[in-house]
Amino acid sequence: MFSSFIEQLRSAGLPVSITEHLTLIGAMKQGVAEYSIEDFYFLSRATLVKDERHLDRFDRVFATVFKGLEAPPGDMATEIPEAWLRKIAEKTLTPEEMAAIEALGGFEKLMETLRQRLAEQRERHQGGNTWIGTGGTSPFGAYGYNPEGVRIGQAESRHRRAVKVWDKREFRDLDGDTEIGTRTMKLALRRLRRFARQGAATELDLPGTIHATASNAGSLDLKMVPERHNAVKILLLLDIGGSMDDHVRISQELFSAVRTEFKHLEHFYFHNCVYERVWRENRRRDETSLSTWELMRTYGSDYRLIFVGDATMSPYEIIQPGGSVEHWNAEAGRVWIERLTGHFRRAAWLNPAREDYWGYTQSILLLRDLMGHRMFPMTLAGLDDMTKELSR
């Protein structure tokens, strides 16, 4: 009766077995969903879908088979007209023109040139290639393009190429109360759970009570045990602001899922790369900051460390002292990453950026090497792989 439906589900990658097919037919014979397409939808979904990751594929096949809709292309994406997004003063260049613009030649050269321009410039500039201004190809300014520069007075990142950002940085904390649309992220994280009974004995031990009562010639002998808790400890370091603005929603969903699943959870924020300090709240960063040395002294090596960030930044922020976009860091970011991964034996990096773009971003490749290739995409498969790695 539903053979074509089952065949299309299998073609879409759903592992529908003959047992599930027969279960669906049996339910229909019992009149579970006789006259309502909506009732049949929920019945067939409950019967045929075993993994929540397949719900979207099921919906597409169901709409095609029973509602007469055309199947959308697998990689369909909505394109927003470029004219809607472009600022009036923004410099728009072709890839060939971008390739022709040369960088100044290194971090020290860039900083020295900026000092000279600040001393010499006397008026506003727009569209040029030398002075601090807007819409040009100078290394200094806003809404233009240069392969490596200092972003000054621009609301958000565009090309992800700024070596430093000269602006007031205000970021929001992630919302731990955000509800996840599906439970799949929580289910994936449950691989990490390790239960133990610790603390005061407050819970009835039924098997122990039965055994003790039987041994006591039938006289009731109650036995109590401590409550069973998830004993795994998680330390979450979250990149916030800048290019991570593109990934706020999925980061909030992850944060909410982790808070639900783990009792022993600590979290702190950083921007782009970890340096000598992290902080608990973004709006009160100075008041809630904590030395990275103190972080390692406070939280033992039994914590699982999870970095969450797109790892997209100037390579100088990782390899160069003073490379941070926000302050002068005396030691390079790579030094702090090595210290943290040396202290926390089980550590991983969760990256929300698309994995097929990683090979084109130098900073992602650098951090992946520093993490010993323990960088995983923020997908359900990536979460599975990360939890397996951290469970070793």
Image (cartoon, helix red, strand yellow):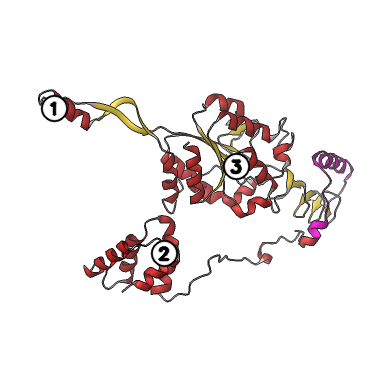
Q: Within 10 angstroms of label 1, few (less than 14), some, or many (20 or more) residues?
A: few
Give the spatial CA distance, label 2 vs label 3.
34 Å
Residue at the spot 35% in from the left edge and 72% down from the top edge:
3
Residue 58's disc is 2
Give the spatial CA distance, label 1 vs label 2.
53 Å
Near-viewer residue (4 or 347): 4
Q: Is residue 324 visible?
A: no
- Part of the protein shown in magenta: 97-120
Q: Which residue is mark 1?
A: 214
Q: Secondary structure at mark 1?
A: helix
Ranked by sequence position, the earlier of labels 1 and 3 is 1
Residue 373's disc is 3
223 is higher (above) or lower (below) than 157: above
What amino acid type should be assigned to the residue bearing mark 3? Answer: His
What amino acid type should be assigned to the residue bearing mark 2? Answer: Phe
Near-viewer residue (105 or 362): 362
Q: Position of residue 305 (x, y in %)?
A: 53, 35
Ranked by sequence position, the earlier of labels 2 and 3 is 2
Q: Within 10 angstroms of label 2, few (less than 14), some, or many (20 or more) residues?
A: many
Q: Is residue 220 left or right of residue 16?
A: left
What amino acid type should be assigned to the residue bearing mark 1? Answer: Ala
Residue at the spot 44% in from the left edge and 56% down from the top edge:
53
Figure quadrant of residue 89: bottom right
Which quadrant holds the N terminus?
A: bottom left
